Image (cartoon, rainbow, N blue to C red):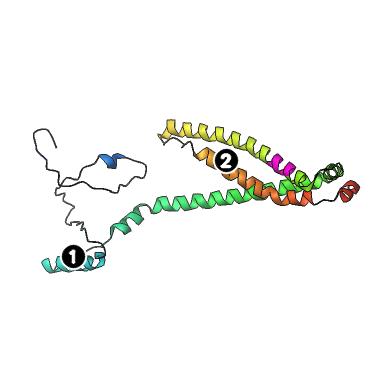
Amino acid sequence: LNEDSATTIIGIVERTQQPWMSNDTVENSTFVPGYMPYGNSSRYLVRTEPGRRDEVIAQVEKALSDSNASRIIGKIRTMEDVRQEAYAGDRAMAIILGVVIVALLTITALGIVGMASFWVAQRTRQIGTRRALGASKRDILRYFQTENFIITTFGLLVGAVLAYAFSLWMMQSYQSPRLPWYYVPIGFLCLWGLGQLAVLGPALRASRVPPAVATRSV
């Protein structure tokens, strides 16, 4: 295409595919008709009406065979198959990362439960003293939940700083996209909720400790 040649636009594609997930060049692309030899073979892209794909595939295969009896017809693939094969690696990576994230969250929750249970066992007399001084079960429950919230918040702040620092390094070293700002607050909310759910069981056990039993504990 140049200034000396005229080009007729026959249509605009509403949505198209591209081989790269994080690239916007597809929005500035043109489809130019032309013949590109592919060795001794040819490839055809056939568009079908909705619901007639399988019927057209059979018709195309028969038409190609009838036009040349010695023709060898290779694999016929739909765009759905091509799309699945193109994104197979990315899909597998996303599944692996999802499994790793779930495993890490599970380990984190189990660690919180273990630490909270240890704190309850170590503070039995302290809990009994608070109960004897008038603290209710709700006060004891709130105490452990607040403590977990504060510890989790400090950890999240450190993690947020490291996440943005790592994102900046990735941008400078590998031209990767910037970390979206909403990832951090969403992560905060999820981990806050996970921490509160994990500490709930030990906190409930602590709130059920009778003042008399806790006072006699050593």
Label 2 Cα crowd, 10 Å radius (few <14 / some 14-19 / many 20+): some
- Front-most of residues 145 and 163: 145
- Front-most of residues 87 and 6: 6
**Residue lying at 11% horizontally and 40% vertically, measured from the top left:** 7
* Residue 120: x %, y % from top left: 78, 47
| Magenta-drawn segment | 142-148
Residue 57 quadrant = bottom left
**Residue lying at 89% horizontally and 46% vertically, measured from the top left:** 215
The image shows residue 68, relative to residue 186, as above or below, that is below
| Residue 167 in view here | yes
**Residue lying at 57% horizontally and 40% vertically, measured from the top left:** 188
**Residue lying at 49% horizontally and 52% vertically, measured from the top left:** 96
Q: Disc 1 vs disc 2: Cβ atoms closer than 8 Å?
A: no
The residue identified by callout 1 is: 60
Q: Amino acid at mark 2?
A: Phe
Left or right for 84, reference 150: left
Name the N-terminal-most of marks 1 and 2.
1
| Residue 218 in view here | no
The image shows residue 150, relative to residue 56, as above or below, that is above
* Residue 183: x %, y % from top left: 50, 40
The residue identified by callout 2 is: 188
* Residue 44: x %, y % from top left: 19, 57
Determine whether the residue tagged by mark 2 lies in a helix, strand or loop.
helix
Left or right for 105, reference 166: right
- Front-most of residues 44 and 12: 12
The Cα–Cα distance between marks 1 and 2, rounded to whole angstroms, is: 55 Å
Residue 22 quadrant = top left
Q: Main secondary structure of the magenta part?
A: helix
Q: Amino acid at mark 1?
A: Val
